[in-house]
Image (tube, rainbow, N blue to C red):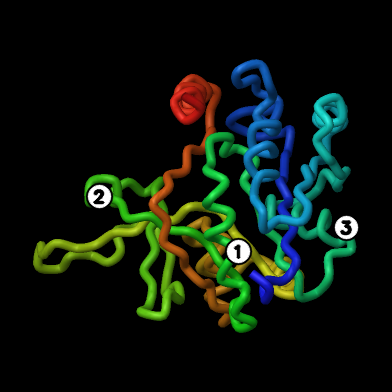
Amino acid sequence: MTNLPKCYGIIPARYGSTRFPGKPLAEILGKPMFWHVFKRASRCPQLSKTILATDDNRIISAAKNLNVPVIKTREDHLSGTDRVLEAAELLNVPENAVVVNIQGDEPAHETAMLTELVLPFSDPNIKVSTLVRKIDPDEAKNPDRVKVVFAKDNRALYFSRSLIPFPRDQQKGEFYGHIGLYAFRMNILKQFVAMGPSNLELTEKLEQLRLLENGIPIHVVKTEHRSFGVDRPGDIEAVTRIIMEQTR
């Protein structure tokens, strides 16, 4: 698409996860998890560059051994988004280019999801995009499953761990679960980090609310694809099965 600005994929990979230390190096089918994330992201035709961003020399060494482009970032970042910004600045990403924050713990993501995420940026008015997928009412009741409601123009209205919209008279509602992939224009990414945490963000523990609370719209893209995150060591077995099924 000729109007699409240059797009950069950055995969934040922190070693010191509280629930799963060394998670980016967890082995899946003989390769570390970050390798699976990188291989899928690098197939996206809209990304001109995809790079791993980490604070840990063990991850850097493993990445170099596997020919995965990697950049060293600081250890003191509070979030993956902060790490993504530092990496983007080290890469001298232009102000109007698009930076994609590719979750380093989703080794089974479909490459097509990244394409869906960045295509809206052919519209110069789009500042941030993210993905959502329709979910069933039982899944929507789970507070670990973040829900989103959005306007007819696909502009996010709110994200919550609570059930939104709440079916007041028990009528059937439509629920959309948030998929934590984000794309930002570089200038907006800088603004996001400079703002610091907002009240709603701290209340719900959802950093995307920082954008909405500061009047920066998030464009929602519906996808049919699922996301499969690895939060704990016990998730490795399940995600391995998914990857094996996808490659049959």
| Mark 2 crowdedness (10 Å alpha carbons): few <14, some 14-19, many ≥20 | few
Residue under pointer 3: 91
Q: Amino acid at mark 3?
A: Leu
Residue 234 appears in the rendering:
no
The N terminus lies in which quarter of the figure? bottom right
Picture residue at 45% right of the left edge, 72% below the top: 156
| Mark 1 crowdedness (10 Å alpha carbons): few <14, some 14-19, many ≥20 | many
Query: Decide: marks 2, 1 in contact (CB < 8 A)?
Result: no
N-terminal-most mark, 3 or 2: 3
Q: Amino acid at mark 1?
A: Val
Q: Secondary structure at mark 2?
A: loop
Q: CA distance from mark 3 to mark 2?
A: 41 Å
Residue under pointer 1: 118
N-terminal-most mark, 2 or 1: 1
Image coordinates for residue 205, horizontal then vertical, percent: 52, 56
Q: Secondary structure at mark 3?
A: loop
Q: Secondary structure at mark 1?
A: helix
Image coordinates for residue 137, horizontal then vertical, percent: 22, 51
Question: Which residue is nearer to you in this view: 177 or 38?
Answer: 38
Question: Which residue is nearer to you in this view: 26 or 6?
Answer: 6
| Mark 3 crowdedness (10 Å alpha carbons): few <14, some 14-19, many ≥20 | few
Image coordinates for residue 13, horizontal then vertical, percent: 72, 40
Picture residue at 76% right of the left edge, 56% below the top: 48
Q: Foreground mark, 2 or 1?
A: 1
Image coordinates for residue 136, horizontal then vertical, percent: 25, 50
Query: Decide: marks 3, 2 in contact (CB < 8 A)?
Result: no
Q: CA distance from mark 2 to mark 1?
A: 26 Å
Q: In which quadrant of the rendered view does residue 175 lie? A: bottom left
Residue under pointer 2: 136
